[in-house]
Structures are given as C-alpha cells and as structure tokens.
C-alpha cells in the first residue's frame, strides 16, 4: 500500500506543477465496487496451463488512484487484484482528443526500471502514437517481488514468473474490456526480455491480441538457462537439471510461435544484448511464422537510429493497429 500511495502522490504533485488539475477518476465516474471472495475456496493456480481458469482467481477488485493530466497525455493510476497478497499497480497513458484509442500492453520484464511510466517524456512519446499504453510489472519483478527468501527469485521460480504473468495479461484484457474509453477490438502487446517471452505465450493463448512486438525475448529454455548471463554461474546447475527443465518445458515460447501465424508479429533483436545467447536467437528465428518479421540491430548506434530516436520503434505498432501517422518508416531491417 505504501508504494501505491507514494506513486499516487507523485502523479498528483506532477499534475499540479504542470498547472493542470488532478482529480480521482472516482470524482467523475461511479466507483467500481470492491468485490470480495474467500480465497480458501479457490483452486491452486496452474502455471503450466496458459489459459486462465477463473476458478483459480478472486473476482477482480479495482482500486482507482489518481489521474494526472498534461497537454500531451493523461496518465491514470489504478490497482487491480485477482490474487491474495499480489496487487498489481497499473498505469494507463492515453492520448488527448481520442475518445476510444486502441490499446497496447507494455511488459518490460525482469531487470528493467519499474518506474518507466513515471517518466513524462516516455509517456508523452507513447501518447503521441495514438494508442493507450497499459503498463504493469510482471510476476516476481519490482514491487511484486516480496515475502520471499532471497534465494527464490525470478529465474528460480520461472514457472510462476512466466505462467502467472501470462494469466495476468488475459485478466488485464478482461478488465480493459469493461471500460468504455478504450478500443479493445484493437489490442497490441510489446514485451522485452522476459516480457517478450510472456507476450508470445499470452498472444498464443489469447486471440484478442492482434499485434505482437517483442525485443530480445527469453525462451528456448535449455539453451537460455545454460548460457544467458542473467543466470548466476553458481546457480546454473540447478536450472539446467532435468527436473527443472521439465517444469519449464511447457512454457517455452518457441513451442507456441506458430500459433501467431496470420497476425502481425515482429521479433526485434539487439545483437549486443548478452542476456540472450546466440543459440537462443537462432532458434527464435527458426520458430518464427512465415509471415513474421525480424528486425536486427547490430550495435547501439543502429538501435538508437531505428528504435529509440523519437519513438520510431512504435511506428510499427501504429501501422498494425491501423492508426494513421504522418510519413512512414520501415523498421524491419530484415524480414523472414
């Protein structure tokens, strides 16, 4: 609750500094009622089964936070909960002047800054692309890593980290569909690193996701666990054991990528990222559907020009969701 309160205060304070008004969404719309249910009657969550089973979750609770309004965008903070003791803080950044923008879910995964959506320039860039950006932390990352011994972390609990997050994406879309200010007929997802793996699995499971853009996705677990620099050498033997590999086998993105055929799918790779071994990159490309696209960036300079400068990476998602934009830039440096 402490972080949520501080986050809300930051948003409210930022709005006042900008000379705008800040008001709770609840002031303008009827509050969403808190729905409660005894967790004792729930079935255990199955991380190895990708499709959501509602019998494993509480009825969704939504706690409305603050809305910060700037000239370039509006940011809404809220908290959702469908598991005991695992609330999820959500940022929804919307462009001005669009009644029902399409939606893009952003999953930045393990090891990235959990406060990206507090950066005003970042949010303004997202909003400039004409879609609503929905950001939240995946399981066992940022504020969702708590009440665990330190030896239990994202990789040691990989089935939960990945499987629970795939469920979260589906349940998040369920919630977004209850709102009348978003066009949930056009949903895209962007995932980076572990968020890329989750995005592939979520899209393979949920066809409501129309466009999938992933950068340096984790996957091909036997090779990734054996060679990725994310895995500490002193723990590597634990994660390359037959018993551990059996637990993560059904959550390997390369087994599901063919299910994305017929939808917009792009695989982006920064070849200088040591988190993804070359063996993994090769198998990811081999598993890509025939109509999938590949964009490869050999060095930081190439990445800056084609991805980070003026939010060019987001142009691809604009096109896939049918959002008009001035000019066109082809970011797919190579296409399979």
Image (cartoon, helix red, strand yellow):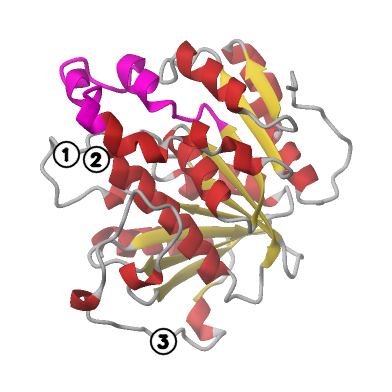
Name the image quarter holding the C terminus.
Answer: top right
First of labels 3, 2 by sequence position = 3
Residue underneath mark 2? 157
Is residue 143 highlighted in magenta? no
Residue underneath mark 3? 33
Q: Residue 36: x, y in percent?
A: 30, 83
**Residue 137 in sight:** no
Q: Residue 123: x, y in percent?
A: 58, 48
Magenta segment, which residues? 215-244
Q: Residues within 10 Å of mark 3 (few under 14, many from 20)?
A: few
* Residue at point 13%, 35% (across, down): 151
**Residue 310 in sight:** yes
- Callout 3: helix, strand or loop? loop
Does residue 23 sit above or below 304 in this rendering?
below
Q: Is residue 200 left or right of residue 47?
A: right
* Residue at point 52%, 89% (across, down): 30
First of labels 1, 2 by sequence position = 1
- For the image shown, how many numbered marks are present on the structure? 3
Does residue 187 sit above or below 149 in this rendering?
below
Is residue 227 highlighted in magenta? yes
Tell which tag, 1 or 2, sits nearer the viewer. 2
Residue underneath mark 1? 152
């Amino acid at each position: 609750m402490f972080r949520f309160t501080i986050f809300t205060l930051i948003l409210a304070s930022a709005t006042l500094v900008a000379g705008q008004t800040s008001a709770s969404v609840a002031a303008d719309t009827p509050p969403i009622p808190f729905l409660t249910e005894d967790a004792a009657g729930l079935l255990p969550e199955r991380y190895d089964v990708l499709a959501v089973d509602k019998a494993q979750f509480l009825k969704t609770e939504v706690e409305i936070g603050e809305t910060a309004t700037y000239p370039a965008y509006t940011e809404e903070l809220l908290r959702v909960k469908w598991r005991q003791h695992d609330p999820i803080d959500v940022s929804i950044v919307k462009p001005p002047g669009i009644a029902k923008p399409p939606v893009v879910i952003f999953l930045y995964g393990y090891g990235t800054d959990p406060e990206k959506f507090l950066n005003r320039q970042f949010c303004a860039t997202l909003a400039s692309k004409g879609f609503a950006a929905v950001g939240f932390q995946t399981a066992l990352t940022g504020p969702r890593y708590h009440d665990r011994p330190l030896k239990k972390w994202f990789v040691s609990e990989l089935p939960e980290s990945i499987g629970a997050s795939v469920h979260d994406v589906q349940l998040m879309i369920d919630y977004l569909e209850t709102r009348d200010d978003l066009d949930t007929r056009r949903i895209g997802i962007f995932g980076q690193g572990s968020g890329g793996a989750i995005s592939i699995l979520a899209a393979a499971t949920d066809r409501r996701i129309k466009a999938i853009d992933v950068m340096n996705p984790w996957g091909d677990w036997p090779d990734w666990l054996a060679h990725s620099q994310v895995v500490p050498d002193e723990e590597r033997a634990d994660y390359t054991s037959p018993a551990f590999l059996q637990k993560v086998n059904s959550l390997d993105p390369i087994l599901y990528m063919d299910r994305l055929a017929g939808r917009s799918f792009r695989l982006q790779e920064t070849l200088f990222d040591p988190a993804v071994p070359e063996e993994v990159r090769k198998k990811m490309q081999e598993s890509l559907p025939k109509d999938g696209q590949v964009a490869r960036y050999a060095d930081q300079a190439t990445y800056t020009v084609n991805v980070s400068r003026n939010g060019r990476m987001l142009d691809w998602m604009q096109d896939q969701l049918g959002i008009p934009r001035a000019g066109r830039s082809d970011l797919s440096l190579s296409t399979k």
